[in-house]
């Protein structure tokens, strides 16, 4: 695959999607486990919003690696590692992003093994980590304007 330019429109759409999913997660009743369990739809919504936020983040990463570096990675864990290898995500967030990618696979393929308590713990303690990784990606994009295609 030949490197090209990262399309700003694609990046902006992914970022808006990720932020919308994180905002939706933060609006769910999750102050404590009892509130989270009160309505079974809350856990279902949390699972969907979380999975879609993770997919958006990794799809953004895939676009950056494909267009900016000519790397055609498909597996989410490979994308996570590739972002760290290229310095798009800091070494301090590498393990977290690989774990997040693995969790997306659990949500998708092993959904029956994901416990509501585990989901609640992630929603209440790890959303800031996803946002911090997104902010690193955005900072990297801002610092590499030569790799950005700003045309519509």
Image (tube, rainbow, N blue to C red):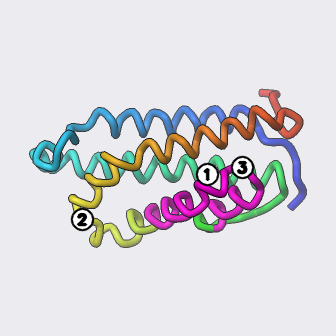
Q: Earlier in the sequence, mark 2 or mark 3?
A: 3
73 vs 126: above or below? below
In space, the residues marked 1 and 3 are separated at their CA atoms by 14 Å
Q: Position of residue 137 (x, y in %)?
A: 66, 43
Residue furthest to the front? 92
Q: Residues within 10 Å of mark 1 (few under 14, many from 20)?
A: some
- Relative side of 14 to 29, left or right: right
Q: Which circle, 1 or 3, is nearer the viewer?
A: 3
Which residue occupies 38% across, 63% down?
107
Q: Is residue 77 rendered magenta in the image?
A: no
Residue 115 falls in image quadrant: bottom left
Q: Is residue 84 rendered magenta in the image?
A: yes
Q: Earlier in the sequence, mark 1 or mark 2?
A: 1
Main SS of the magenta part reads: helix
In space, the residues marked 2 and 3 are separated at their CA atoms by 32 Å
Residue corresponding to mark 3: 88
Q: Earlier in the sequence, mark 1 or mark 3?
A: 1
Q: Dots 2 and 3: beta carbons under 8 Å?
A: no
Q: Which mark is residue 42?
A: none
113 vs 127: above or below? below
Q: Dots 1 and 2: beta carbons under 8 Å?
A: no
In space, the residues marked 1 and 2 are separated at their CA atoms by 26 Å
- Relative side of 107 to 146, left or right: left
Which residue occupies 29% across, 66% down?
114
111 vs 15: above or below? below
Residue corresponding to mark 2: 115
Residue corresponding to mark 1: 59
Which region shows up in magenta?
A: 78-104
Say which element carries label 2: loop
Which residue occupies 56% across, 63% down?
95
Q: Position of residue 134 (x, y in %)?
A: 58, 42
């Amino acid at each position: 695959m030949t490197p090209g330019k990262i399309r700003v429109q694609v990046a902006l759409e992914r970022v808006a999607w990720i932020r919308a999913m994180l905002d939706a997660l933060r609006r769910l009743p999750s102050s404590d486990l009892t509130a989270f369990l009160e309505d079974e739809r809350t856990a279902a919504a949390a699972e969907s919003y979380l999975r879609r936020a993770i997919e958006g983040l990794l799809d953004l990463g895939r676009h950056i690696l494909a267009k900016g570096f000519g790397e055609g990675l498909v597996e989410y864990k490979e994308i996570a590692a590739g972002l760290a290898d290229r310095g798009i995500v800091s070494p301090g967030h590498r393990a977290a992003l690989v774990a997040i990618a693995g969790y997306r696979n659990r949500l998708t393929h092993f959904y029956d093994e994901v416990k509501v308590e585990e989901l609640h713990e992630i929603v209440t303690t790890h959303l800031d980590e996803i946002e911090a990784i997104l902010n690193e990606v955005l900072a990297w994009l801002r610092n590499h304007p030569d790799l950005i295609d700003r045309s519509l």
